[in-house]
Image (cartoon, grey):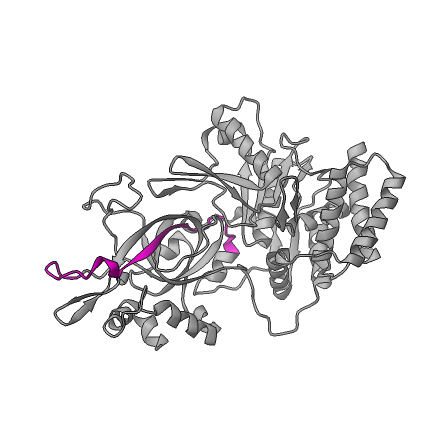
């Protein structure tokens, strides 16, 4: 494959390819691209990323780009002729190339099925993450000054979500919330037609306002932030210690430890009874100013975070269920990538009553906390989708939402730190990638933990099994945060120290 020619004009390249091959379903273009990227992975970074409304508006149809968006659903399938011959030339619908009206169509058996997926951009991406993905690539601001950050106007163009129909001749996972890089190009607007599922949609003379993207190959984005540094990187325990120092500059020591472990949570496994890998957290004693501080702190450190104001006005008027109707997506705060950190801001909760929508939204929040699931409304039918959204509830007093861990937020200081740019990169990389690690307990570790828990139960027979589950989550996250292959007495004692602080507060 001549990748340079393909990148310059992908539609012309595919049109030329149609003259020399009839390989189904896509003339072999996906295999060619995958082979090129496997042989030279750096080439994929030469393709501009489109992830925001601003990027989309600046993209000309037919230009090769990398669409970085979150999957919503598989909308439907359509059937196309991948090659039609007329007067010595082959035409292909892969690039929306229309054959002359008087040409003779081939046998219907030569048609191929094309999947049409609904994707959405990610408004929860942090501004620094957007900057990292732009071709201009501005240097990251290493200064953590919450007061200054709050004065900066959010770039509304980049915050606004867009949706697009992505047409691909290959299949991908249909689980909502997965972020993909889809390599292809924007197509010219297409008239809407009756699709195979039989939905009532406008006639041919109505052109959709939803952009159409032709996807030639794709890959799931396992990590949103994986920079490569020239110098050797510090160990995970060293980076963890640096992150803890940053948190300790804002929070009291125990709160900083609890928050660090919460930051690294991610669903690892689930049964009908328990979710393994994360815990929900309620910091009470917070004020609206503190909630604002944490929101900006998270946007400074995480690739993706979402703040949801929990008050009567918001919850009574804004349905939280992501929904798709007539293949059009209605975005909500939960149309975000898996492992996005959710902040539920209860500090603005006012006097009033929740209406039917508000009560429904409260139940949605409870379901995320208790089950890590979200009900998507697809064409008037609800589908229960497993998610992974670590939840932090900030409230003035104990939250209306029951969380696994409830603890006073303590004294919160205004952060004004000047971070070394390399350290900032390391911490962001650590937070984005360590959560993907897992700790599997060995037989030796199992025996150690069993003996340790037996000792705890002998000393305090009032401990509930749910509390022991929290202790095990804390210990697992401690192991993950350090990259530890096995439990040591030091790690276990540290986990028990945090656990005892939680229990001591609960008894007060």
Q: Is residue 40 left or right of residue 506?
A: left
Quadrant for the N terminus in the image = bottom left
Quadrant, the C terminus? top right
Q: Quadrant of residue 480?
A: bottom right
User: For residue 395, what is the image quadrant?
Assistant: top right
Report how many numbered discs are placed on residues in the image: 0
Foreground of the two, 102 or 53: 102
Relative image position of residue 377 (x, y in whole percent): 43, 37
* Residue at 44% in and 72% down: 37
In this picture, residue 195 sits left or right of residue 280: left
The residue located at (58%, 53%) in the rendering is 302
When the figure is inspected, residue 302 is found, relative to residue 462, above or below; the finding is below
Q: Is residue 433 visible?
A: yes
- Residue 133, given in percent of the width and then of the height, sits at 47, 61
* Magenta region includes residue 124: yes
Q: Which residues are magenta?
A: 99-128
As drawn, the residue found furthest toward the right would be 459
Foreground residue, 366 or 123?
366
Q: Residue furthest left?
A: 102
């Amino acid at each position: 494959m001549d990748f340079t020619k393909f990148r310059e004009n992908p539609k012309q390249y595919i049109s030329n390819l149609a003259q020399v091959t009839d390989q189904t379903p896509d003339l072999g273009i996906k295999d060619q691209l995958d082979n090129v990227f496997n042989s030279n992975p750096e080439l994929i970074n030469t393709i501009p990323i489109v992830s925001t409304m601003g990027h989309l508006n600046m993209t000309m149809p037919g230009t090769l780009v990398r669409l970085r968006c979150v999957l919503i659903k598989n909308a439907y399938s359509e059937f196309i002729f991948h090659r039609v011959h007329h007067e010595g030339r082959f035409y292909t619908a892969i690039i929306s190339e229309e054959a002359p009206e008087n040409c003779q169509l081939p046998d219907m058996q030569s048609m191929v099925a094309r999947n049409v997926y609904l994707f959405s951009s990610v408004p929860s991406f942090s501004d620094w993450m957007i900057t990292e993905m732009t071709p201009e690539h501005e240097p990251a601001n290493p200064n953590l000054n919450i007061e200054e950050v709050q004065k900066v106007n959010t770039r509304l163009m980049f915050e606004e979500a867009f949706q697009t129909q992505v047409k691909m001749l290959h299949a991908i996972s249909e689980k909502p919330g997965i972020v993909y890089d889809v390599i292809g190009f924007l197509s010219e607007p297409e008239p809407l037609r009756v699709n195979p599922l039989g939905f009532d949609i406008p006639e041919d003379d109505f052109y959709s306002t939803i952009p159409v993207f032709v996807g030639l190959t794709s890959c799931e984005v396992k990590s949103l932030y994986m920079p490569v540094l020239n110098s050797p990187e510090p160990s995970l325990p060293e980076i963890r210690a640096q992150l803890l120092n940053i948190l300790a500059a804002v929070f009291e020591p125990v709160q900083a430890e609890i928050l660090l472990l919460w930051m690294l949570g991610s669903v690892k496994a689930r049964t009908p009874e328990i979710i393994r890998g994360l815990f929900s957290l309620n910091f009470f004693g917070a004020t609206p100013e503190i909630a604002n501080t944490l929101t900006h702190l998270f946007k400074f450190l995480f690739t993706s975070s979402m703040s949801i104001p929990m008050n009567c006005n918001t919850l009574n008027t804004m349905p939280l269920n992501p929904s798709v109707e007539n293949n059009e997506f209605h975005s909500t705060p939960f149309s975000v990538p898996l492992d996005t950190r959710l902040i539920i801001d209860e500090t603005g909760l006012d006097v009033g009553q929740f209406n039917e929508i508000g009560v429904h939204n409260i139940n949605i929040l409870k379901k995320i906390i208790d089950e890590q699931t979200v009900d998507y409304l697809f064409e008037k039918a609800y589908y229960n989708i497993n998610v992974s959204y670590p939840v932090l509830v900030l409230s003035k007093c104990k939250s209306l939402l029951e969380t696994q861990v409830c603890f006073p937020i303590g004294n919160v200081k205004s952060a004004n730190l000047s971070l070394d740019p390399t350290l900032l990169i390391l911490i962001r990389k650590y937070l984005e990638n360590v959560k993907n690690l897992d700790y599997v307990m060995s037989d030796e570790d199992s025996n150690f933990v069993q003996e340790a828990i037996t000792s705890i139960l002998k000393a305090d027979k009032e401990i509930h099994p749910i509390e022991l589950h929290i202790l095990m989550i804390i210990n697992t996250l401690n192991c993950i945060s350090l990259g530890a292959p096995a439990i040591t007495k030091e790690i276990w004692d540290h986990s028990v120290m945090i656990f005892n602080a939680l229990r001591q507060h609960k008894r007060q």
